[in-house]
Image: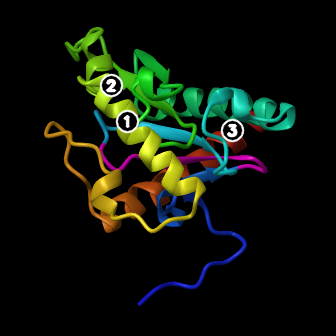
Amino acid sequence: MTTPMTANDIYFFKYLVNNQVFYRTKFTYALVNLKPLVPGHVLVVPLRTAVLRLGDLTPDESIDYMNTLQLIQKFITKTYKADSLNIAIQDGPEAGQSVPHLHTHIIPRYMTDGYGDSIYSKLESEDLEAEYKRFEVRKRQYLDHLKVDKSELAQNDADRKERTPTTMQEEATWLNNEIQKFIAHLKT
Protein backbone atom coordinates (compact mmCIF):
# COMPACT_ATOMS: atom_id res chain seq x y z
CA MET A 1 0.00 0.00 0.00
CA THR A 2 1.39 3.40 -0.93
CA THR A 3 0.79 6.64 0.91
CA PRO A 4 -0.62 9.44 -1.26
CA MET A 5 1.84 12.26 -1.88
CA THR A 6 0.95 15.64 -0.34
CA ALA A 7 2.26 19.14 -0.94
CA ASN A 8 4.07 18.92 2.40
CA ASP A 9 5.97 15.73 1.58
CA ILE A 10 9.73 15.96 2.03
CA TYR A 11 12.13 13.97 -0.11
CA PHE A 12 15.82 13.20 0.27
CA PHE A 13 16.66 12.43 -3.34
CA LYS A 14 13.72 10.14 -4.18
CA TYR A 15 13.08 8.85 -0.67
CA LEU A 16 10.12 10.13 1.32
CA VAL A 17 11.58 11.20 4.69
CA ASN A 18 8.67 12.98 6.41
CA ASN A 19 9.04 10.90 9.59
CA GLN A 20 12.79 11.51 9.82
CA VAL A 21 12.57 15.32 9.68
CA PHE A 22 12.88 17.22 12.94
CA TYR A 23 13.25 20.79 11.65
CA ARG A 24 12.02 22.61 8.54
CA THR A 25 12.27 26.11 7.09
CA LYS A 26 11.05 27.60 3.82
CA PHE A 27 13.94 26.07 1.83
CA THR A 28 15.75 23.63 4.11
CA TYR A 29 15.19 20.75 6.52
CA ALA A 30 17.14 18.71 9.06
CA LEU A 31 16.66 15.00 9.50
CA VAL A 32 18.00 12.07 11.47
CA ASN A 33 20.42 9.79 9.68
CA LEU A 34 19.51 6.32 8.44
CA LYS A 35 23.00 5.06 9.30
CA PRO A 36 24.57 7.49 11.80
CA LEU A 37 28.28 7.33 12.58
CA VAL A 38 27.63 8.43 16.17
CA PRO A 39 24.54 9.48 18.16
CA GLY A 40 23.48 12.95 17.01
CA HIS A 41 24.79 12.54 13.44
CA VAL A 42 22.14 14.43 11.46
CA LEU A 43 21.80 15.88 7.96
CA VAL A 44 20.78 19.31 6.69
CA VAL A 45 19.24 19.20 3.21
CA PRO A 46 17.60 21.68 0.80
CA LEU A 47 13.91 20.98 0.16
CA ARG A 48 14.37 21.28 -3.61
CA THR A 49 15.50 17.84 -4.81
CA ALA A 50 17.07 19.25 -7.99
CA VAL A 51 19.87 20.72 -5.86
CA LEU A 52 22.63 18.21 -6.48
CA ARG A 53 25.56 20.38 -5.35
CA LEU A 54 26.17 23.44 -3.19
CA GLY A 55 26.48 25.71 -6.24
CA ASP A 56 22.95 24.73 -7.35
CA LEU A 57 21.32 26.64 -4.47
CA THR A 58 19.63 29.94 -5.33
CA PRO A 59 20.77 33.00 -3.34
CA ASP A 60 17.70 32.77 -1.06
CA GLU A 61 18.22 29.03 -0.58
CA SER A 62 21.91 29.63 0.23
CA ILE A 63 21.09 32.10 2.99
CA ASP A 64 18.45 29.81 4.46
CA TYR A 65 20.75 26.78 4.19
CA MET A 66 23.60 28.51 6.04
CA ASN A 67 21.27 29.87 8.73
CA THR A 68 19.83 26.38 9.21
CA LEU A 69 23.32 24.85 9.39
CA GLN A 70 24.32 27.32 12.09
CA LEU A 71 21.16 26.70 14.11
CA ILE A 72 21.47 22.91 13.87
CA GLN A 73 25.21 23.12 14.66
CA LYS A 74 24.48 25.01 17.90
CA PHE A 75 21.54 22.76 18.74
CA ILE A 76 23.44 19.48 18.23
CA THR A 77 26.45 20.80 20.18
CA LYS A 78 24.23 21.65 23.16
CA THR A 79 21.89 18.67 22.97
CA TYR A 80 24.62 16.06 22.64
CA LYS A 81 27.15 17.96 24.79
CA ALA A 82 29.68 17.72 21.96
CA ASP A 83 33.19 19.10 22.36
CA SER A 84 33.39 19.78 18.61
CA LEU A 85 31.60 18.91 15.38
CA ASN A 86 32.46 17.74 11.92
CA ILE A 87 30.40 19.64 9.37
CA ALA A 88 30.90 17.89 6.05
CA ILE A 89 29.60 18.42 2.54
CA GLN A 90 30.67 15.85 -0.02
CA ASP A 91 30.10 18.09 -3.04
CA GLY A 92 30.07 15.70 -5.98
CA PRO A 93 30.89 12.04 -6.51
CA GLU A 94 34.67 12.54 -6.47
CA ALA A 95 34.27 13.96 -2.97
CA GLY A 96 32.37 10.86 -1.83
CA GLN A 97 28.80 12.11 -2.35
CA SER A 98 26.69 8.95 -2.50
CA VAL A 99 23.22 10.51 -2.82
CA PRO A 100 22.64 12.99 -5.69
CA HIS A 101 20.95 15.59 -3.47
CA LEU A 102 23.01 18.17 -1.58
CA HIS A 103 23.28 17.37 2.10
CA THR A 104 25.53 18.38 4.97
CA HIS A 105 26.55 15.96 7.70
CA ILE A 106 26.67 17.35 11.23
CA ILE A 107 28.58 14.90 13.41
CA PRO A 108 29.16 15.41 17.15
CA ARG A 109 32.76 14.85 18.25
CA TYR A 110 34.29 14.30 21.66
CA MET A 111 37.81 14.53 23.04
CA THR A 112 37.54 10.85 23.96
CA ASP A 113 35.97 9.44 20.77
CA GLY A 114 39.29 8.38 19.25
CA TYR A 115 38.21 8.88 15.64
CA GLY A 116 40.43 11.84 14.74
CA ASP A 117 40.43 12.40 10.99
CA SER A 118 39.46 8.78 10.36
CA ILE A 119 35.84 9.94 10.62
CA TYR A 120 36.22 11.18 7.03
CA SER A 121 37.05 7.73 5.73
CA LYS A 122 33.75 6.55 7.18
CA LEU A 123 32.00 9.12 4.98
CA GLU A 124 33.93 8.34 1.79
CA SER A 125 33.98 5.48 -0.65
CA GLU A 126 37.27 3.67 -1.16
CA ASP A 127 36.77 3.29 -4.94
CA LEU A 128 36.00 6.81 -6.14
CA GLU A 129 35.99 5.94 -9.84
CA ALA A 130 33.41 3.19 -9.37
CA GLU A 131 31.41 5.43 -7.03
CA TYR A 132 31.44 8.20 -9.63
CA LYS A 133 30.04 5.83 -12.26
CA ARG A 134 27.32 4.66 -9.86
CA PHE A 135 26.53 8.28 -8.98
CA GLU A 136 26.20 9.22 -12.66
CA VAL A 137 23.84 6.29 -13.27
CA ARG A 138 21.73 7.27 -10.25
CA LYS A 139 21.72 10.91 -11.35
CA ARG A 140 20.64 10.04 -14.91
CA GLN A 141 17.93 7.72 -13.64
CA TYR A 142 16.68 10.34 -11.23
CA LEU A 143 16.66 13.08 -13.83
CA ASP A 144 14.95 10.80 -16.34
CA HIS A 145 12.40 9.73 -13.69
CA LEU A 146 13.19 6.07 -14.27
CA LYS A 147 12.23 3.42 -11.77
CA VAL A 148 15.29 2.22 -9.91
CA ASP A 149 15.67 -0.72 -7.58
CA LYS A 150 16.53 0.61 -4.12
CA SER A 151 19.50 -1.76 -3.92
CA GLU A 152 21.11 0.03 -6.87
CA LEU A 153 20.99 3.32 -4.98
CA ALA A 154 22.25 2.03 -1.66
CA GLN A 155 25.93 2.22 -0.90
CA ASN A 156 27.73 -0.74 0.65
CA ASP A 157 28.89 0.11 4.15
CA ALA A 158 29.33 -2.79 6.55
CA ASP A 159 30.30 -0.47 9.40
CA ARG A 160 26.87 1.12 9.74
CA LYS A 161 23.51 -0.56 9.98
CA GLU A 162 20.22 0.89 8.82
CA ARG A 163 17.87 1.86 11.61
CA THR A 164 14.18 1.06 11.61
CA PRO A 165 11.63 3.68 10.55
CA THR A 166 10.17 3.56 14.07
CA THR A 167 13.55 4.27 15.68
CA MET A 168 14.20 7.18 13.33
CA GLN A 169 10.70 8.61 13.86
CA GLU A 170 11.12 8.43 17.64
CA GLU A 171 14.46 10.24 17.42
CA ALA A 172 13.03 12.87 15.06
CA THR A 173 10.08 13.48 17.40
CA TRP A 174 12.41 13.85 20.38
CA LEU A 175 14.75 16.19 18.46
CA ASN A 176 11.78 18.25 17.24
CA ASN A 177 10.63 18.75 20.83
CA GLU A 178 14.15 19.62 21.95
CA ILE A 179 14.80 22.08 19.12
CA GLN A 180 11.53 23.89 19.83
CA LYS A 181 12.72 24.41 23.44
CA PHE A 182 16.17 25.41 22.17
CA ILE A 183 14.70 28.02 19.79
CA ALA A 184 12.37 29.36 22.48
CA HIS A 185 15.36 29.75 24.81
CA LEU A 186 17.30 31.64 22.10
CA LYS A 187 14.46 34.16 21.83
CA THR A 188 14.52 34.98 25.56
Decide which of tag 2 and tag 3 comes sooner along the chain: 2
Q: Is residue 145 left or right of residue 27?
A: left
| Residue segment shown in magenta | 25-35
Q: Closest to the observer: 13 or 112? A: 13
x%, y% of residue 173?
A: 48, 60
Q: Specify the quadrant of the image occupied by residue 163.
A: bottom left
- What residue is shown at x 44% (from left), y 21% (from top)? 95
Residue 188 shows in the view: no
Q: Secondary structure at mark 1?
A: helix
Position of residue 3 relative to residue 128, above or below, is below
Q: Closest to the observer: 105 or 49? A: 49
Q: Is residue 187 left or right of residue 119?
A: right
- What residue is shown at x 79% (from left), y 38% (from top)? 61
Residue 144 disc label: none
**CB within 8 Å, label 1 to label 2:** yes
- What residue is shown at x 19% (from left), y 48% (from top)? 161
Q: Amino acid at mark 2?
A: Glu
Residue 48 shows in the view: yes
**CB within 8 Å, label 1 to label 3:** no
Q: Secondary structure at mark 2?
A: helix
Decide which of tag 1 and tag 3 comes sooner along the chain: 1
x%, y% of residue 71?
A: 65, 32
Residue 185 disc label: 3
Residue on which disc 2 sits: 129
Q: Amino acid at mark 3?
A: His
- What residue is shown at x 13% (from left), y 40% (from top)? 158
x%, y% of residue 87?
A: 49, 22
**CB within 8 Å, label 2 to label 3:** no
Residue 133 disc label: 1
Q: Residues within 10 Å of mark 2 (few under 14, many from 20)?
A: few
**Inter-mark Cα distance, 1 to 3:** 46 Å
**Inter-mark Cα distance, 1 to 2:** 6 Å
